[in-house]
Amino acid sequence: MSELSTQTASPKAKYRADYIKPDYTITDIDFEFDLYDTATHIVAVSKVVRQVETDAALVLNGDGLELVRVEVNGTAWSDYDVSESSLTLRSLPASFDLTIETLVNPEANTLLEGLYKSGGGFCTQCEAEGFRRITFYLDRPDVLARFTTKVIADKTSFPYLLSNGNRVAEGDLDNGRHWVQWQDPFPKPSYLFALVAGDFDVLRDKFKTMSGRDVELEIFVDKGNLDRADYAMASLINSMKWDEERFGLEYDLDIYMIVAVDFFNMGAMENKGLNVFNSKFVLANSKTATDTDYQGIEAVIGHEYFHNWTGNRVTCRDWFQLSLKEGLTVFRDQEFSSDLGSRAVNRIQNVRIMRGPQFAEDRGPMSHPIRPEKVIEMNNFYTLTVYEKGSEVIRMMHTLLGEEKFQAGIKLYFERHDGTAATCDDFAQAMEDASGVDLTLFRRWYSQAGTPVVTVTTDYNAEQKRYLVTIEQNTAPTAGQDDKLPLHIPMDIELYDSVGHVIALECNGEPIHHVLNVTEAKQVFEFDNVNEKPVISLFREFSAPVVLEYGYSDEELVFLMVHARNEFARWDAGQMLLAKYIRTNIANVQQGKDVELPESVIDAFRGALLDENLDPAFIAEMLALPSENEIAGWYKIVDVDAINAVAGKISAILAYALEDELTAIYRSLSQGEYNLAHEAMAKRALRNRCLSYLAHTEEGNKLVAEQYVSSDNMTDTMASMAAANNAELPCRAEQMTDFSDKWTHDGLVMDKWFMLQGANPAADSLANVRKTMSHPAFDLKNPNRTRNLVASFCANNPVRFHAKDGSGYAFLTEILTALNASNPQVASRLIEPFLKYRVYDEQRQALMRAELEKLAKLENLANDLFEKVQKALDQ
Ligand code: TRP
Ligand code: ZN
């Protein structure tokens, strides 16, 4: 039996427009798993009900399964056909019990979909279409069944046997095995099924819900890791409380379990009552995890918990509706993190993801609307567009409706759709009906791909005291979608007078709301009673996922950096100022000139650095340059070397010009005992930002080496190592050896080291990456290890990956070829840098295209890669 479904012809695409209800549904399923490493028998007894008049065949999905037996109402059934991907049954009664026994090999399952072994334990991953690798089933999210699951395994090796819902029975068998039976009272689609068996340490706690029910909380971690689960537990409790307070949503089962596993394709999975997590998003203590890791844990724990309502209680009708649960749940986890921590810093970090990788996705061959129209491999659509842009679309509704009406919309959505599988349209309709806000045009965000460019011009008439704001929107054609229409864009603005006071918005004596409704290709907004030429703040809070074009002067940007009322706008002005000089300098470098920054720009950043009224975490963001990838996105033809040179030199110019201030602040922020309060994290963020600049100066870089030696926590350790790595300091080599000696036994911690190896700017970086692959902690079959080393080199080290000799490209093809066979889902993430070959010079384009053509010819090319390679070659 081969692991991958053998591919005879080109895989077939599915279209959103082709949705039809299933001919049959399944109301109940009774499972029995007899777990063995290489041969697990699974018996599923399903209650099947026909939903159409005619006696249609029942076509069940399957993948990589061995069929052992089929029974209908308890007797052997022979009127069926079985193929690699389906089981078709004929001559069936209108309703019946269907028994199917399958045999699978969890140990050989390197895809990490379906039932597999991670470390010593068993676990499952079913979203999107992994359930069909467990049993033949109607594996689609609009079939909701009540699950009962009996798990049988060896008692010594697998003392914990877990599944969804409540534990209803258990017992011992005489052969050293034992069993537990679980029952989930909530009907659910197959993708939310989960099973775990293993030996763990368990962290337990309790939560009392707002209506007074007690919930048992359990976090299962590998033995020896109990001291790394506290933050995840605290985050879970915070999530449960927050969802009650902000959304009025309460947990619905008596137990909530989280299992941390080392082998996992994505971040985490919201299986009902039994979340399975990548251990990266559970395990942390001050010695092993950075502040960024802690923030990730809080966000992902929140995200999966919030899915219990937005995803599980109301699920998706079909996979084209994925953003219904993901966009909304990302919005909820972003709000959670913002309510608990710094709203401004969270917003800035999320906007960076939009402007960098999401905008890049919108420009590339895989570009799709947040609700895709055509899919070959569903795993390819768990994207920044569906998740992050999907969240921005929900956020725009929130901006248009306001919190109160938005919450009324949520309430109506649950009244209408609780316990069912819904669509994105259902959500928009509930928002519209509950608020009275017309969302007809707004719905276009669900169907139109691409990033709109909004060009603004302003005109002030001193005599009439009138200010005109002219807005034009345009969305460039995207892959497979040539014609674009105007969108409903909420544009949040503010006007300032010359001393920084806010000017009231009005026209003809009527007040105007600060969120303008831009709905046409070209529109003019008029403001009167404006006594002097104002400075305008545009798209405050990034009120829409668009590119803004406005001819700000340096003076206006420096003014906004100081005077804008909200922190986001101040940061954004700083970014626009930097962007201007990054562009100018790239042009200069291309003409062989030097990199320069005017004194006024340096002063603006000095001002931000020294502003004692600002949150240090916010100052750290103010001082961060856009990433090289974000800068690359501004160009039709990308010059990776010039971008890298300019980014490096601007950092060095700022470092030398501000050396005294950076050093003084660095020293003044030196810490007492490590703790996780926002204030302490904020200070570390700014201190380590200072360090990253100081790494460029002769005096300052000594601090980098000192910090590594004196650090008592991973945040400061990593900051020192990253600074040494980026600036290629002599202390780097010693640090890397010391770190690897200390942590080789711990893959999760070593991921940080692998990431640095991948990002190493040294000329021999690729040779070093290749050598690193034989480090004892490296394992190409572990997605975390692979991502940290390979993606950090291929996606985040542009100068070395895009080496003119094509060596970086050849390396990626080798990795993709290996992963195509063992784990195509991970391969499909790593291939991304190849998809954008069109934006490089001709020589690099040709080299990358040749690699894509090689991949296209691979025998048994998996659907995941097939879809991307084909789209890339077609562009
Ligand atoms: N639903 C998960 C989430 O966003 C993500 C997910 C989709 C996933 N497919 C997966 C996780 C496969 C792991 C493996 O929370
Ligand atoms: Zn999710």
Image (spheres, helix red, strand yellow):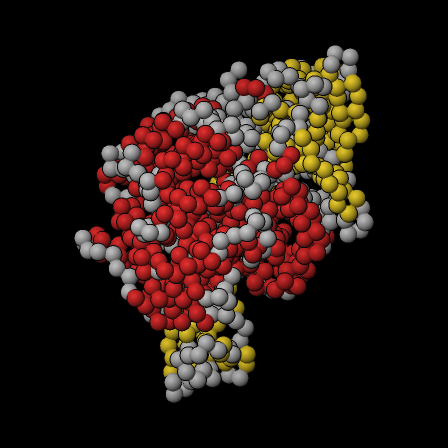
Residue drawn at x 61%, y 55% is: 340
**Residue sitting at the far left:** 592
Task: Give the quadrant of the C terminus.
Answer: top left
**Quadrant housing residue 257:** top right
Taking the image as shown, residue 197 lies to the left or right of residue 767, namely right
Taking the image as shown, residue 32 lies to the left or right of residue 875, namely right
Residue drawn at x 43%, y 70% is: 562
Taking the image as shown, residue 148 lies to the left or right of residue 615, namely right
**Quadrant housing residue 807:** top left
- Where residue 495 appears, as percent x and y from the top left, is 46, 75
Q: Is residue 3 above or below residue 665?
A: above
- Where residue 186 appears, as percent x and y from the top left, is 74, 38
Residue drawn at x 46%, y 76% is: 500
Q: Foreground residue, 336 or 135?
A: 336
Asked if residue 846 can be seen in this view, the reply is no
**Residue sitting at the far top:** 175
Q: Is residue 40 above or below residue 15?
A: above
**Quadrant housing residue 662:** bottom left
